[in-house]
Image: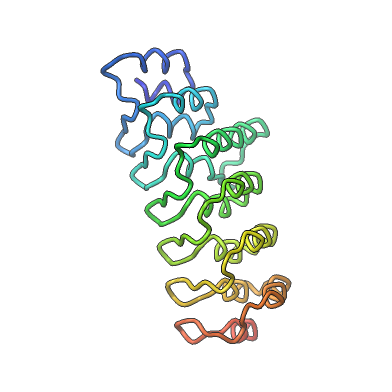
Amino acid sequence: MLLKAAEEGDLDEVMSLSCQPTVDLNEQDKSGFSALHYAVKNRRVAVVTFLLEQPTIDPNIQDYKGSTPLHLACHISDKNPFSESGQQAQHTICGILIQNPRINLNVKDKKGRTPLIISIQSRDIQIFTLLMEHRPDTYLSDNDGCNVFHHACKLGLKYFVEKLIESGVNIEAKDKYGARPVHYVARNNNIDLLIYLKSLGAQLNVPDDSGQTPHSISNDN
């Protein structure tokens, strides 16, 4: 009942159920979704706000994919574009979660992705900026050894690249295959970004574990 009420945004029902001693606010269904997951996914701002005010709620609870409510809030899919009001609600929820002192910004899902990596994959500047204002760990890597800078370079997102550089990321960090961010830029034949990284000291002749250098990759393209 609680999960359904949270999903539908029925604040009165959620409040009523939360007062019952037998109701577990951290109850999870077969997918691992909790009431907070459902409220976040369906952009129920009032329910999210109420649940986070409850001392027994676990704001970092993970579903079976390892996603916390913050992971869900940071995810925007091109396949399911929001209306302007829906996007505004999602940004509001992100702000509520990120500013909550109990939220861990650095939890990884089962693919090793942090909310910051998700925000970059979603290409959402507002969510990315909100996260960066609260100083998440930009050195954490996913299961492939890629950190946020790898992902920003892989997607060719210069704004994100510039902001991450301003925060002090290591532009020469290697993934588990020995590839550095500049390798990803070269693979995508992004000449402007390649020149930019080179100007910052990125090495174009250092090979990855397969022996490929950014320079050789760029020439092949």
Residue shown at 66%/58% (left/top)?
163
Q: Picture quarter containing residue 209?
A: bottom left
Residue shown at 46%/50% (left/top)?
106
- From the top left corner, tell me how far across and down residue 54 is, in percent: 41, 24
Residue 198, relative to residue 157: is it above or below? below
Front residue (pair 40, 98) = 98
Residue 2, relative to residue 100: is it above or below? above
Residue 199, relative to residue 81: is it above or below? below
Residue shown at 38%/29% (left/top)?
57
Front residue (pair 17, 129) = 129
Report whether 25 appears left or right of 158.
Answer: left
- From the top left corner, tell me how far across and down residue 206 is, in percent: 55, 85
Front residue (pair 10, 195) = 195
**Render colour scheme:** rainbow
**Quadrant of the snapshot with the C terminus:** bottom right
- From the top left corner, tell me how far across and down residue 93 is, in percent: 56, 33
Residue shown at 45%/55% (left/top)?
113
Report whether 194 appears left or right of 9.
Answer: right
Q: How many badges with numbers are in the image?
A: 0
Front residue (pair 201, 14) = 201
Q: Picture quarter containing residue 112?
A: bottom left
Report whether 88 appears left or right of 140.
Answer: right
Residue 15, relative to residue 214: is it above or below? above
- From the top left corner, tell me how far across and down residue 165 is, in percent: 64, 63
**Quadrant of the snapshot with the N terminus:** top left
